[in-house]
Image (cartoon, rainbow, N blue to C red):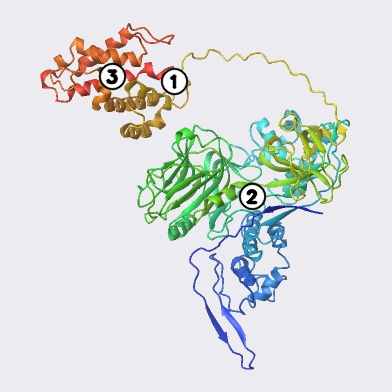
């Protein structure tokens, strides 16, 4: 029996411009037997020689869907149209004489229920006649064509992933990589350093990750492990690349590959086998590649016009696999590396398309006047600002069509419209207090339409913030800009982090579509079915995990559940306790999030279609040999009637305290604390319009960390500007100034000697300093251990007043207010407020 997990199918429109009108031409044959011939335009917008179809019309709607989504895109001679045509190589699925016959041929090489498993896709993925430099990119594009066809052929119903029994094998003894690089440095590394450093090192002219030829042997060792097969050195990626792919051979490929294999054999022979503890209760074992691909469909992509999935995993090009020509393929520049499980990591560079290809965005988005940008991103930190450019279609730091960026904990969305300036400002930003942006993998969608303007969604939820410049048109967009990820096209607005997916839609995604796409997830994910039937009296019993490669160094295990593929099996009462993950012959030392699991399978919670959830937690475990070599298994403290008496290892003693040297006893107030303090001192609301405008302007120059060692002169300038605005608002508001200074001081006095006599100075300075320095009427600090001497501060402010009133009787009429504002700003903008 089988269990199924339903995933909604996707329907995607692939059209570069409006569909050209078609007409039907009926021709009668002289014999009286009439044949209907339909002149249908080809909707493919590639540069190949693509004649319009003029054979018999499609007999069914499904044949028409096949023509629009598959035939039109593959018939160009630079794709499949030079071989698989009438009289050519079988199967003739792009034959030009009869679309119905082409349809019949295509059905022999496609799998509409699982397009990725289609023979056509697999053939191209293996390198057959790919029109790009990446066979994987070509396969992804063709898979997309078939999925578009299947979306209609299956009535738009959800795609079904069928859980099938995996290969049954016991966990075996395994060689595991040593913790240090000493042996690697004397065996494999010399070959890599001598012959691969021209590309695979950080200091290469055009660096290409992974950096397994780095000058740092420890870094090279970590990067090389995924390319080494300790159990079968001949299958190591280093060997295969030389032996069968003839990649960068330095003399003779056969001899060079043998030299590499010999080095790996020497390295592996020095590593002892790790034997599994025979007392452990273990499941059967699996490789990641034994799993069932979990991310096959379910996304809403009807209106995708550009898409980057980052599946290639090597080289310097990230391919646009939307299938909409011209493809905006991105060149990886600078320190940009590939991330396992599909993605790129940007440290100091960018991924940029050409202006010519980027014009596709201008053409298609201005045509609809609306769009969505969808991405899965993981910011490296929450201190980036500028805003740092995550996704941008722009011409520099001051002009753009759109940008999605980061400012600290906020996402920023800039869109050039008839209601904004040429830089897309004012920006729509997530609220500071929500701290929506986190240094974790997040699904981010920004929408624009001419009525509602801009909206931002994070992890499926709309962020409630009004657009400061709603609506408008895209008529002012510039078609000479370039599309770029991770930076500005000028290279001076770096964003650091991981990007796993980006898509541009030429219509906004609906809230439900956004939630659906978020639930589908991102990256290469597998269902791993760990067999436990040999441990319990239940046929076809499995503990199932969703597993993906999290990054270059780890795997993510998520959403475990128990299921039997036999719908008649009795699972009621099965106890599962203390589940742990094993890797390459031993339980992993970290990431054991399920060690305290205690679940009983019951008929009331179990479903024959979906099983029973064991935990909502996910966990990350180390990557050792890579997806093709790491062998996983599970262990249990109890499953059914079998129990394991686990003895927990003693808690290691705490390490001696690190000697980190002296650390400052004082720190800085951060930007939000500075504004809040100024508000309390002056009584002016932080929401005062003038204060808000100044705060937004200088916020990026205010301190973001409490560490006093990060202080700079730019901080003081920004604090002063903000202090001046608070004091200006205070003095100009009669109610606020009376509340602080009393009613006796005359702010309209023009004679400076009278206005700032000794007694009247005290009317200003004493209440002001009492608030700034938190002092009692006697000048003593309250709840403060140390602070500047009040008398000294007052002397300095009196000296400032002396300098400002030198105009005597010829001062401007508002001079008194100006002097009070200056004294106030000096008092609240100094170290007394800044330090804490």
Measured as percent of width and height from the top left, residue 64 is found at: 61, 71
Asked whether, in this view, residue 417 is left or right of residue 169, the answer is: left
| Circle 2 residues within 10 Å: few <14, some 14–19, many ≥20 | some
- Real-space CA distance between mark 1 and mark 3, rounded to the nearest whole angstrom: 26 Å
Residue holding disc 3? 740
Measured as percent of width and height from the top left, residue 199 is found at: 62, 42
Residue 107, compared with residue 407, is above or below; it is below
Asked whether, in this view, residue 310 is left or right of residue 184, the answer is: left
| Mark closer to the observer (2, 1) | 1
| Circle 3 residues within 10 Å: few <14, some 14–19, many ≥20 | some
- Real-space CA distance between mark 2 and mark 1, rounded to the nearest whole angstrom: 46 Å
State which quarter of the image contains the N terminus.
Answer: bottom right
**Circle 2 sits in a helix, a strand or a loop, which is it?**
loop
* Quadrant of the image occupied by residue 586: top right
Of residue 484 and residue 106, the one placed in the foreground of this image is: 106
Asked whether, in this view, residue 826 is left or right of residue 52, the answer is: left
Return the disc, 2 or 1, that comes first in the chain's sequence.
Answer: 2
Return the disc, 1 or 3, that comes first in the chain's sequence.
Answer: 1
Return the disc, 2 or 3, that comes first in the chain's sequence.
Answer: 2
Measured as percent of width and height from the top left, residue 192 is found at: 69, 38
Disc marking residue 668: 1
Measured as percent of width and height from the top left, residue 41 is found at: 54, 73
State which quarter of the image contains the C terminus.
Answer: top left
| Labelled pair 2, 1 in contact (Cβ < 8 Å) | no
Residue holding disc 2? 312
């Amino acid at each position: 029996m089988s269990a199924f997990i339903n995933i909604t199918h996707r329907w995607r429109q692939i059209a570069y411009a409006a569909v050209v009108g078609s007409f039907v031409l009926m021709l009668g044959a002289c014999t009286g037997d009439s044949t209907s011939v339909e002149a249908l335009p080809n909707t493919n917008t590639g540069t190949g020689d693509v004649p319009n179809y003029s054979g018999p019309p499609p007999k069914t709607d499904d044949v028409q869907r096949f023509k629009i989504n598959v035939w039109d895109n593959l018939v160009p001679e630079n794709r499949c149209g030079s071989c698989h045509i009438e009289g050519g190589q079988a199967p003739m699925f792009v034959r030009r004489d009869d679309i119905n016959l082409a349809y019949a041929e295509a059905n022999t090489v496609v799998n509409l229920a699982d397009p990725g498993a289609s023979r056509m896709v697999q053939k191209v993925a293996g390198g057959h006649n790919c029109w790009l430099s990446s066979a994987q990119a070509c396969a992804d594009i063709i898979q997309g064509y078939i999925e578009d066809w299947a979306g209609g052929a299956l009535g738009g119903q959800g795609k079904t992933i069928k859980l099938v029994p995996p290969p049954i094998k016991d966990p075996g003894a395994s060689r595991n990589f040593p913790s240090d690089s000493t042996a690697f440095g004397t065996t494999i590394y010399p070959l890599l350093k001598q012959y691969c450093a021209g590309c695979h090192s950080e200091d290469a002219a055009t660096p290409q990750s992974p950096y397994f030829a780095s000058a740092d042997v420890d870094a090279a060792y970590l990067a090389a492990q995924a390319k080494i097969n300790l159990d079968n050195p001949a299958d190591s990626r280093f060997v295969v690349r030389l032996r069968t792919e003839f990649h960068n051979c330095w003399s003779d490929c056969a001899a060079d590959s043998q030299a590499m294999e010999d080095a790996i054999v020497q390295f592996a022979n020095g590593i002892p086998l790790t034997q599994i503890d025979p007392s452990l209760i273990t499941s059967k074992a699996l490789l990641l590649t034994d799993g069932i691909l979990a991310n096959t469909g379910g996304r809403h992509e009807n209106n995708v016009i550009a898409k980057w999935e980052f599946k290639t995993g090597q080289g310097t090009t990230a391919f646009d696999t939307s299938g909409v020509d011209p493809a905006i393929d991105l060149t990886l520049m600078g320190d940009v590396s590939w991330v396992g499980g599909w993605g790129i990591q940007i440290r100091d560079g960018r991924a940029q398309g050409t202006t010519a290809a980027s014009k596709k965005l201008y053409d298609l988005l201005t045509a609809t006047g609306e769009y969505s940008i969808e991405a899965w991103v993981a910011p490296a930190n929450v201190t980036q600002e500028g805003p740092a450019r995550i996704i941008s279609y722009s011409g520099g730091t001051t002009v753009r069509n759109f940008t999605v960026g980061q400012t600290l904990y906020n996402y920023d969305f800039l869109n050039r419209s008839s209601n904004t300036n040429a830089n897309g400002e004012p920006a729509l930003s997530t609220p500071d207090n929500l701290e929506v942006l986190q240094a974790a993998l997040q699904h981010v969608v920004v929408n624009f339409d001419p009525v509602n303007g801009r909206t931002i969604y994070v992890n499926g939820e709309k962020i409630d913030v009004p657009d400061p410049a709603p609506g408008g048109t895209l008529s002012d967009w510039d078609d000479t800009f370039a599309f770029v990820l991770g930076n500005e096209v000028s290279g001076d607005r770096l964003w650091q982090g991981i990007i796993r997916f980006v898509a541009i839609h030429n219509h906004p995604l609906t809230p439900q579509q956004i939630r659906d796409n978020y639930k589908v997830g991102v990256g290469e994910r597998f269902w791993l079915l760990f067999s436990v039937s040999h441990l319990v009296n239940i046929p076809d019993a499995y503990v199932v995990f969703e597993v993906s490669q999290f990054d270059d160094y780890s795997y993510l295990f998520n959403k475990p559940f128990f299921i039997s593929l036999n719908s008649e099996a009795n699972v009621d009462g099965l106890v599962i306790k203390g589940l742990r993950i094993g890797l390459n012959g031993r339980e992993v030392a970290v990431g054991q999030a399920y060690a305290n699991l205690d679940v009983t399978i019951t008929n009331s919670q179990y479903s024959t279609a979906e099983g029973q959830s064991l935990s909502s937690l996910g966990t990350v475990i180390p990557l050792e040999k890579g997806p093709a070599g790491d062998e996983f298994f599970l262990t249990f403290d109890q499953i059914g009637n079998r129990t394991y008496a686990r003895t927990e290892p003693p808690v290691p003693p705490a390490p001696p305290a690190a000697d980190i040297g002296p650390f400052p006893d004082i720190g800085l107030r951060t930007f939000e604390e500075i504004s809040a303090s100024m508000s309390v001192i002056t009584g002016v609301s932080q929401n005062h319009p003038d204060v808000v405008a100044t705060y937004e302007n200088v916020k990026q120059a205010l301190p973001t960390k409490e560490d006093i060692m990060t202080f700079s002169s730019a901080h003081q300038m920004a604090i002063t500007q903000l202090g001046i605005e608070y004091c200006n608002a205070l003095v100009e508001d009669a109610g606020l100034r009376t509340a602080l200074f009393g009613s006796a001081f005359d702010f309209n006095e023009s004679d400076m000697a009278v206005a700032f006599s000794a007694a009247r100075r005290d009317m200003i300075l004493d209440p002001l300093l009492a608030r700034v320095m938190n002092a009692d009427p006697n000048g003593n600090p309250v709840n403060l251990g140390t602070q500047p001497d009040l008398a000294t501060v007052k002397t300095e402010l009196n000296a400032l007043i002396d300098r400002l009133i030198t105009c005597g009787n010829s001062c401007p009429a508002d001079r008194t207010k100006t002097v009070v504002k200056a004294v106030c700003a000096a008092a609240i903008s100094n170290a007394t407020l800044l330090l804490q």
